[in-house]
Amino acid sequence: MLGADDGVVSTASLMIGVAAASPSASRETVLVAGIAGLVAGALSMAAGEYVSVSSQRDAENADIALETRELTIDPKGELEELTAIYRGRGLAPDLAAKVADALSLAGNSLTSHMRDELGLEASKMARPFQAALVSAASFACLAALPVIALLLAPSPMRIVTIVCVSLGGLAVLGALGGRIGGAPIGRASLRVVIGGGAAMAITALIGKLLGAAGIG
């Protein structure tokens, strides 16, 4: 959701800034800026997410390696530790010991320690490549909104069209995020729209000032 919001706001703001800096700029110029922002943003999101999730996966692997060594060096102590975990969760001491013994005898000691001591499950461990792809795709899909708006808008209305389409997309994203998170939909939507609108307005102002200074 955050990547999608970023895609709309950053790409729309970039295109609006370029158009405001040079009102005579061709549609192709603004389009190139939008596509460049879309690609650069998606790749940046993917790289950042990959690095972040890879660090998380490295930490998980380090915890698993440490637990494997401890099970090899001191299996009895680890069994007692697992028993203590089950007692702490409300099982009677005898039952906790039986559960820990049963899991250990079944060859599931590492799996049990991963799940109950480390809070890790193989199916839910961090996946850097998957996270990077999802992040890039969510950014790119919504960043396409202002690009499409530019392609459909008449030249005199290009900034207004980009703003309206982008704010509409942000309103839908905000409402969806509010619904998923259990927050009031209207408030969540309004918050995202105000933030995105402010970013676009500030970028447009900076672009206009740069254009007036002869930089655009």
Image (cartoon, rainbow, N blue to C red):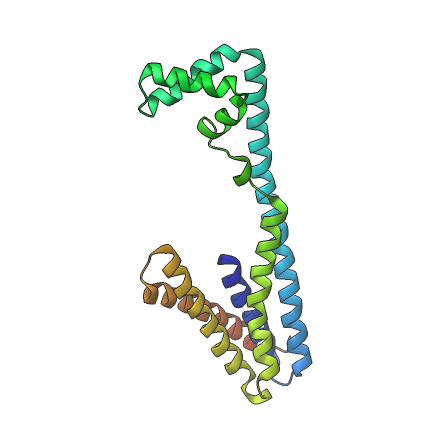
- Residue occupying image coordinates x 56% and y 60%: 138
- In x, y percent, where is residue 182? 33, 56
- In x, y percent, where is residue 14? 58, 70
Viewer-closest of 97 and 51: 97
Give the quadrant of residue 38: bottom right
- In x, y percent, where is residue 156? 56, 89
- In x, y percent, where is residue 123? 54, 39
The answer to whether residue 180 is seen in the rendering is: yes
Give the quadrant of residue 184: bottom left
Viewer-closest of 170 and 128: 128
Q: Is residue 145 above or below residue 159?
A: above
Count of numbered circles in the view: 0
Q: Is residue 130 left or right of residue 121?
A: right
Q: Is residue 127 above or below residue 14?
A: above
- Residue occupying image coordinates x 50% and y 18%: 104
Q: Which corner quadrant holds the C terminus? A: bottom right
Q: Is residue 158 left or right of residue 179?
A: right
Q: Is residue 154 above or below residue 65?
A: below
The answer to whether residue 20 is seen in the rendering is: no
Q: Is residue 71 left or right of residue 195?
A: right
- Residue occupying image coordinates x 48% and y 29%: 118
Viewer-closest of 96 and 35: 96
- Residue occupying image coordinates x 55% and y 35%: 122
